[in-house]
Amino acid sequence: MKKLVRITTVPISLDKLLGEQLRFINQYYEITAVSADELELKRVAEKYGVKNFHVEMTRKITPFKDLAAIWKLYRFLRREKPEMIHTHTPKAGLVGLTAGFLAQVPVRMHTVAGLPLLETTGYTRKLLNLVEWFTYRLATKVYPNSFGLKDIIIKEKLGHPKKLKVIGNGSSNGINIHYFDEVQISQAAKRSLQSKLGISEQDFVFIFVGRLVKDKGINELVKAFWALGQIKTTAAEGEMQKKWTTSPKLLLVGPFEEDLDPLLPETMEEIRSNANIICVGFQEDVRPYFAVSDALVFPSYREGFPNVVLQAGAMDLPSIVTDINGCNEIIEGGKNGIIIPVKDSAALQQAMENMVCDTNLYHTMKENGRPMIESRYRQEVVWKALLEEYRASVAALSASRQA
């Protein structure tokens, strides 16, 4: 069986971004998962039935640690002689493709799921541009996980257009529509969680799922939610009627990252002091939290192809997203959600208000959510398209060796 090495910076990416894709592809290629955090890596590898090899990597700029990681991975690749490596996340791409190039692995693939450099300027921007350019030069194929991201890569001259390809309609892994289905959460489980979180049946609950950091738009989200809570009057006759039977709730599901991308002090204070903001931290299973919510709000500054928007849609939730690549490919304004400008708390507050007040619009978007996700982003479709990429690459490699 041909060998394939899948590399991510941290094991949670293997688990949450790829998951069962590893088990599916492992039927056709012998997969070794490579990542940091040895104990967690072993747990994830055993979960999906694949081999593993530990290489400690960091998400920050750490030249000496990066060189040590490259050397360790290079020796592993020289010993194993895989036909293909496939990297995900920026640091894993740099380390993995450098080691793969030096070890003469013939097929070197890299998936791009977002560009942190888009939110930087000056020297840092130049450095990150150079790192991305160098990473793509080392790859034999680069897979942006959205068409918008592909356009950005071409515009920024980071990679040759002939190397770039979007798998299917986008996404690194698609969506498991059987797992992310509202019917999987019983009414009893919903009522129990609502009681635990202090949510009533009359509350309109906005949910955010992801890292609670600046780049995800959390500062703007908290500011917009504060403004939304100040609205207590009914609109004049002839305008949209505002029915605030109870205060809207904001449910934040995810970890803070104060060392990498901290929130403003005033944002943190509002999260702590506002009784209508419910912060539950990282959750292994986010489905119950979607099930007790009414709409996703995802005001991120940059994305590749956000899985959380797929998940929310599959769980029958409309979404408010920013007008960035990935988000504006999944969401069609007025059909399954609302699209707003980036870093615009006023527009975000207005969109949240429209979700609560315009019941016809809300129900139209809610009804369209799951069918639109199911028809375009079923997981099996993405997996099969990726498998065909692997097969084509191996076939081309065999042909070149025979020539």
Image (spheres, helix red, strand yellow):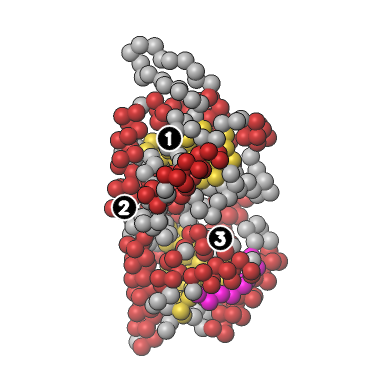
Task: Estimate the spatial distance between the alpha carbons at disc 3 and disc 2, rounded to whole Å.
Answer: 25 Å
Q: Single out the mark in the foreground, 1 or 3.
A: 3
At label 2, the amino acid type is Glu
Q: Earlier in the sequence, mark 1 or mark 3?
A: 3
State the image coordinates of residue 204 (x, y, percent, origin top left). Answer: 45, 32
- Residue placed furthest toward the right: 64
Assess disc 2: are there few (<14), some (14-19) or many (≥20) residues with their C-alpha within 10 Å of its C-alpha: some
First to last magenta residue range: 50-57
Task: Estimate the spatial distance between the alpha carbons at disc 1 and disc 3, rounded to whole Å.
Answer: 30 Å
35 and 143: which one is in front? 35
Residue 139 higher or lower than 61, as above or below = below
Q: Earlier in the sequence, mark 2 or mark 1?
A: 1
225 and 5: which one is in front? 225
Tag 3 secondary structure? helix
State the image coordinates of residue 358 (x, y, percent, origin top left). Answer: 36, 26
In contact (CB < 8 Å): disc 2 and disc 1: no
Q: Earlier in the sequence, mark 3 or mark 2?
A: 3
Labelled disc at residue 374: 2
State the image coordinates of residue 221 (x, y, percent, origin top left). Answer: 53, 35
Q: Which residue is mark 1?
A: 340
Q: Single out the mark in the foreground, 2 or 1.
A: 2
Residue at horizontal 59%, vertical 71%? 42
* Residue 137 in view, yes or no: no
Q: Which residue is mark 3?
A: 12
Looking at the rendered image, the quarter that the N terminus falls into is bottom left
Residue at horizontal 47%, vertical 15%? 233
Looking at the rendered image, the quarter that the C terminus falls into is bottom left
143 and 309: which one is in front? 309
Report if residue 89 lies within the magenta region.
Answer: no
